[in-house]
Image (spheres, grey):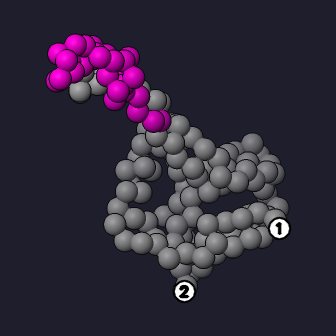
Amino acid sequence: MAKIKSKKTSYYGNDFDSKAEGEFYLLLRSDKNVKAIELQPQYTLLSAFSVPCYRCEGNGRVENKKTLRLNKCTLCSGTGKRMRQPWKYTADFKVTYKDGKEEVIDVKGYANERFPLVKKMFESVMGRELVVWQKNNKKGWVRK
């Protein structure tokens, strides 16, 4: 995966991960149709879940090789299950317009290989479009 070289910037006391994101924030602030801008809203795409522990095979106990006694499994702490973290996605902006319409926006300078999967998962789970804006040197801001 390629390393993305972006400089963190700050506008109106808000920190942004890239210069393009900060510039888009200034564009949103100047738009008369925008009622509210929420910075970096977080969405859960996949809730936390558990899988059976492979070491104890879901029993919670493992045989000690020296004493041949059953001990509590240290990998799952004796529960027989291992927890997996939820999959969360943080968008750049959630914009509410004066007419009541809401958009979740992500500003991209460069979209890595993983982003199309995240976008598709977001749209599937949330049931709304993830709007992607990209800055083009010749055309200005382009909606992708």
Q: Are marks 1 and 2 in contact (CB under 8 Å)?
A: no
Q: Quadrant of residue 65?
A: top left
Q: Residue at x 70, y 54 (%)?
A: 39
Q: Residue at x 77, y 46 (%)?
A: 99
Q: Is residue 141 left or right of residue 79?
A: right
Prevailing SS of the magenta stretch = loop
Give the tally of numbered discs.
2
**Disc 2 marks which residue?**
138
Of badges 1 and 2, the one in the foreground is 1
Where is residue 72? Give x, y as percent: 33, 18
Which amino acid type is shown beneath numbered disc 2? Lys
- In this view of the protein, which residue sits in the foreground, 61 or 59? 61
Q: Residue furthest front?
A: 67
Q: Residue at x 54, y 86 (%)?
A: 138
- Please give the label number shown on residue 135: none
141 up-or-down from 76: above or below: below
Which amino acid type is shown beneath numbered disc 1? Tyr
Magenta range: 57-86
- In this view of the protein, which residue sits in the foreground, 115 or 59? 59
Q: CA distance from mark 1 to mark 2?
A: 27 Å
**Disc 1 marks which residue?**
12
Where is residue 20? Give x, y as percent: 62, 73
Q: Residue furthest bottom?
A: 138
Where is residue 25? Give x, y as percent: 72, 66
User: Which type of secondary structure does the marked residue at label 2 adopt?
Assistant: loop
Where is residue 89? Give x, y as percent: 52, 46
- In this view of the protein, which residue sits in the foreground, 28 or 13? 13
Query: Which image quadrant: the N terminus?
Result: bottom left
User: Which type of secondary structure does the marked residue at label 1 adopt?
Assistant: loop
Residue 73 part of the magenta-drawn span:
yes
